[in-house]
Image (tube, coloured by chain):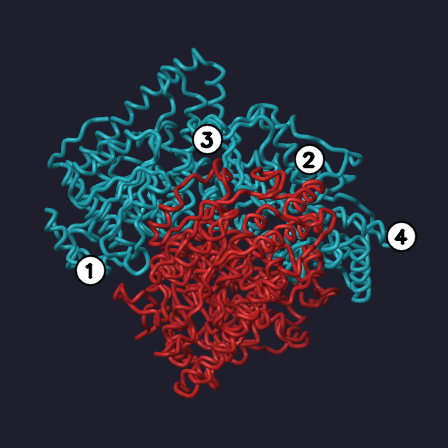
Chain colours: A red, B cyan
Amino acid sequence: MPSFTPHAADDVAIATIRTLAVDVVGKANSGHPGAPMGMAPVAHVLFSRFLNANPKNSKWFNRDRFVLSNGCALQYVLLHLLGYKLSLDDLKAFRQLDSKTPGHPEAGHTDGIEVTTGPLGQGFANGVGLAIAQAHLGAVYNKDGFDLINNYTYVFTGDGCLMEGVASEAASLGGHLQLGNLIVVNISIDGDTAVAFTENVEQRFLAYGWQVLHVDNGDSDLAGIAGAIAEARKEKTKPTIIRLRTTIGFGSKQQGTHGVHGAPLKADDIEALKTKFGFAPDQKFQVPQATYDLYSEFGKRGAALEAEWNSLLQSYAQKYPKEHAELTRRIAGELPAGWEQTLPVYKPTDAAQASRKLSEIVLTAIIPGLPDLIGGSADLTGSNLTKVKNSVDFQPPSTGLGTYAGTYIRYGVREHAMGAIANGLHAYGAIIPFVATFLNFVSYASGAVRLSALTGHQVIWVATHDSIGLGEDGPTHQPVETAIALRATPNLAFWRPADGNETSAAYLSALKSKKTPSVLSLSRQNLPNLEGSTIEKAARGGYVLHDEEKEDLTIVSTGSEVSIAVEAAAKLKEQGIKTRIVSLPCWLTFDQQDEKYRLSVLRSGAPILSLEALSTAGWAKYSHEQYGLPAWGASGPYQKVYEKFGITGSNIAAVGKKVVDFYKQKGGEVVSPLVKAINL
Amino acid sequence: MPSFTPHAADDVAIATIRTLAVDVVGKANSGHPGAPMGMAPVAHVLFSRFLNANPKNSKWFNRDRFVLSNGCALQYVLLHLLGYKLSLDDLKAFRQLDSKTPGHPEAGHTDGIEVTTGPLGQGFANGVGLAIAQAHLGAVYNKDGFDLINNYTYVFTGDGCLMEGVASEAASLGGHLQLGNLIVVNISIDGDTAVAFTENVEQRFLAYGWQVLHVDNGDSDLAGIAGAIAEARKEKTKPTIIRLRTTIGFGSKQQGTHGVHGAPLKADDIEALKTKFGFAPDQKFQVPQATYDLYSEFGKRGAALEAEWNSLLQSYAQKYPKEHAELTRRIAGELPAGWEQTLPVYKPTDAAQASRKLSEIVLTAIIPGLPDLIGGSADLTGSNLTKVKNSVDFQPPSTGLGTYAGTYIRYGVREHAMGAIANGLHAYGAIIPFVATFLNFVSYASGAVRLSALTGHQVIWVATHDSIGLGEDGPTHQPVETAIALRATPNLAFWRPADGNETSAAYLSALKSKKTPSVLSLSRQNLPNLEGSTIEKAARGGYVLHDEEKEDLTIVSTGSEVSIAVEAAAKLKEQGIKTRIVSLPCWLTFDQQDEKYRLSVLRSGAPILSLEALSTAGWAKYSHEQYGLPAWGASGPYQKVYEKFGITGSNIAAVGKKVVDFYKQKGGEVVSPLVKAINL
């Protein structure tokens, strides 16, 4: 780390960031100029003096991670100036359709963006995840003389993020975990928060166990900013938050007013601002060569650091070939050959078990061969069954409760932060996070789950107690709408396995889907192992569990209700009604199969009845008739709750009979709902 | 308030609570005995000495509100002992089907339960809402000599609730709002939180601006508990949190261990415990007469207080007849006669406006006549357009920013707490809360929204920027799965109005639905006023906007896409294809219409195509073919984003043609998807 010596080029560079941000927002006629203008000085000091990264290889593994939690134009401006794959033309296309510079930064879409931000609080919690990932991988792979993984995570955040519960949860956990590698810069704006946010932020973060530093003049005290960052880096057992006071819209005529927050600056104000900063008032998107030159040093330093790191890695390969092979495999995102062989396989004669228990059996089988899996639960470990024997807690060594090399995270009752932290863990690389709570409380984390799917984070949710089958806890805990909310989320695999083989299939799919989060919806109650289920068939998302020629009825179901459908079919058989059973554990995966297969599973010729102990919403896509919960669940022993709602073999047989009679009486061909004029 | 003098009956009463809780959980063989055992002393001191309420009329308006945030058996035991409508038999039916004592307390289901709790953090935030309600109504209606509304809100919470983001958000806002009438008792359990929750809770709450008090021996220091409550009541400009240390499962053999948290006690432990507390070891559900006698004092005090209050109210009626009439109307949950007349009505020639703007026009029209409406936004007031002219902020007077009589709450960026606080506002009574954010961020508050629907809170969500029509902010902000998640939530009215009349209809319905929350999904972009829309028709949830005899096609749509469907129909007409247009702004309301009406709107005879700029999930219930977003949205000017996804008059016309051709070729009768063998 070079020491800080401010020079004239610094002011030019900061002015460049400010004026570029104004032009970017002005050209788009959309966006927020105030924040990037205020953050320009600290961004400049951080990137020009501290941050280690190589713009020519934005994926260099030991780079410092930078997160802009209140994502905005600033980040694009910086990426361009620093030499990432983002041109001035890309900046000019800010917020235009199909540009590299969408309204909020999306990881995977734009070179150099670490995590998707914009929805407030997420980036802050992602940062905690990124820092956990470094602490963990460093503890596992670093050796004497091989400080391979030692980067910092820097997060910029406004006060908006700090108000969000997800950030509070993450901050509390980050303090508990003593993440010294995490440095948050909180850009607070004078007078901006009087109506709703008057808490003492310093005291709150001290309460969480953070180091709190201050820079009173964030508009121009570059040495002060550099000093604070340097001090933050020295603190090894606490995360740091640097509170930076800035003037909103610094340099503009509206400086210090609200007008500059959410709307582009007016033309005359832009001109005055540029004149003040020594730029041509009538030209847009000006970048002095001196600024490019200054930032080229960032690129050179980063390239040199990466080269140094690569040679360190080569020596490491010599001395620690096993660790090296494992680490490089993990960084490449590949699973060890043959891992699937460890997945449990079941016969119908095997004992009935709850699918949460079947999940535990899978985890127990695969975790020894998959150090990539970093798990945890939001304080429901004993119910979610996610901590396998001999696993060690991820904890600061000083607590005596675990080590940073541990792979089990105690998230506390913090579902939303857990989801966002898991996104950060995955964004870091070399980690496949799994997290756990009751299915109903996945919705506490909706904000994070949606960004997981949008960005393509391979996060696995172990979501137990997935229906009225949880029984006594009652309707406050029984999901109804949760499944369809997750099924309607693009690029999210919602799995509801019916037995042991299907649970193995769900994990198989979740672990192979490198760019898709999966939610495994698991029962509290025991489920029999089904005749006709196999891992291979279930892995297609839907399949014929029990076939009949020229059937009178097909029942399509998922999870704990499949065995009830099987019971109903047996009763219908006694009445001469032939019933096929389709198990459809994952809609997303089934929808990805070819049309011929899908139409062979849910075929025309007889009515299709869906059965699930949840809202029926969404099922009309696959079935002519739907049976499910009419409204909320109920508290009681689960068998009685199932009876209350008529989800029993005998009642479903009666319903099936009614359906068969209705369609016979109606006459005409019964066409599968999958036969469509349009398919999006 | 009587002063505190401990006597022997106190110990008996506390032992009764403890042993009853153990029996209740033991009989159900389900539940958590540890927490109620630990909370027994503070519950006893609070109810026997401080809390003002009348068990014979649990709805007395000025009662103190009691919330058990980590809802459990304790509350049922207390309600029984205090004389509410809950018998010993009800306690014996704990967690049994259709009992008055479900697994977690549900307001409206059990006499004396103020809010539905169990999902952690909710009750804490509800408490902030209850306290805001008191502060507001007191400021509006109290007069010199008429301290009509002056109750306290007491919240019991464990550490689990305090870890949740929703509680952090609510605590920060509660401190800002200086809610001196709010007293939280935090029962923390020694050593329970070391793995994930080591923050300094005292310091955190001081940072929020709370008074923090301590009782080190919550197991038996009754005088200390009483002293802390008394001190809390004295602090008028800060909420108070009393940190109470207890021993988990106090008195049991497993005292202080985790075994006693989540599972019923073993038989021999129950016997030992009862013996220790002087109860017959082999008898269950024992209540000494001395305990009933002691608590009958609570009932007498409450009845006397209510009688006193009623006579105060009578004098108030004499002196302030207008205020009295308004207050009693509001308490009764009635709207002022004729308020609907103020709803704006539109003609097709009226200018196109964004439905968020139409919402503002409604609010501007109705708020002067409806002081019941207490609004607010999660820091997006300027975008949600929820603050009408001349409305005053709800703020502590000392801030100089408003008064407690103000009706506009600045929630800060705290969506989840906002939702839970709104539930508390409604639970208090005399208030209809409306809250606002972008539709996409309603999902941050899912946990609260679901409990709102389960409990039947009339909360109105003004959810703007409801689709890709928000344009530049991009996919991080554009809802896809949000609408179906809300539509699949029982007892939740999701309204997506297409124009001015439909927006008025949505408010009409939301305000008339006393036991149903409504989410109004509103556009950022302008929408034309449609030929054929009326408030009356839209109020049925779905109607024929444009009819045709012997149509070739029906397009069913909502919100901003209805006018696009109308465009498509015009283009199809040019090709000789007759297209009916159905507007379906609210599924819940439409589903409640009689079958004949529903089948006349979405009738058989021609294919039905649905159109919505969201996920198509759920639409197959109403339509044969679905057009919507195939996955995520995109960032760009909104017209371009609509074009990208083919949601334009000309493309929908082409899609409609394809649908018509497909069904013609297929032949046979086209039956409405509403024709069903079974309807749940």
The amino acid pointed to by label 4 is: Glu
Q: Which quarter of the figure is the N terminus of chain B placed in?
A: top left
Mark 1 and mark 3 lie on one chain; the one further toward the N terminus is: 1
The numbered disc on residue B536 is 2
Q: x%, y% of residue B214?
A: 23, 42
Subunit that carries the residue with mark 4: B
The numbered disc on residue B266 is 1
Q: What residue is shown at x 50% (from left), y 69% (from top)?
A: A63
Mark 4 and mark 3 lie on one chain; the one further toward the N terminus is: 3
Q: Secondary structure at mark 2?
A: helix
Q: CA distance from mark 4 to mark 3?
A: 59 Å
Q: Answer with the quarter of the image where residue A488 lies.
A: bottom right
Crowding near pointer 2: few (<14 within 10 Å), some, many (20+)?
some
The reply to whether dot 1 and dot 3 touch (C-beta < 8 Å) is no
The reply to whether dot 2 and dot 1 touch (C-beta < 8 Å) is no
Task: Indicate left or right for B250 with B173 as reference.
Answer: left
Q: x%, y% of residue A203?
A: 35, 46
Crowding near pointer 1: few (<14 within 10 Å), some, many (20+)?
some
The amino acid pointed to by label 3 is: Gln
Q: Nearer the viewer, residue A219 or B19?
A: A219
Q: x%, y% of residue A260?
A: 61, 41
Question: Relative to B543, does residue B477 appear above or below in the rendering?
Answer: below
- Please check whether the numbered discs 2 and 3 fall on a single chain: yes
Subunit that carries the residue with mark 2: B
Q: Which residue is mark 4?
A: B574
Q: x%, y% of residue B670?
A: 75, 59
Q: Judge depth for marks 2 and 3 and give the one in front.
A: 3
The numbered disc on residue B395 is 3
Q: CA distance from mark 2 to mark 1?
A: 62 Å
Q: Judge depth for marks 4 and 3 and give the one in front.
A: 3
The reply to whether dot 4 and dot 3 touch (C-beta < 8 Å) is no
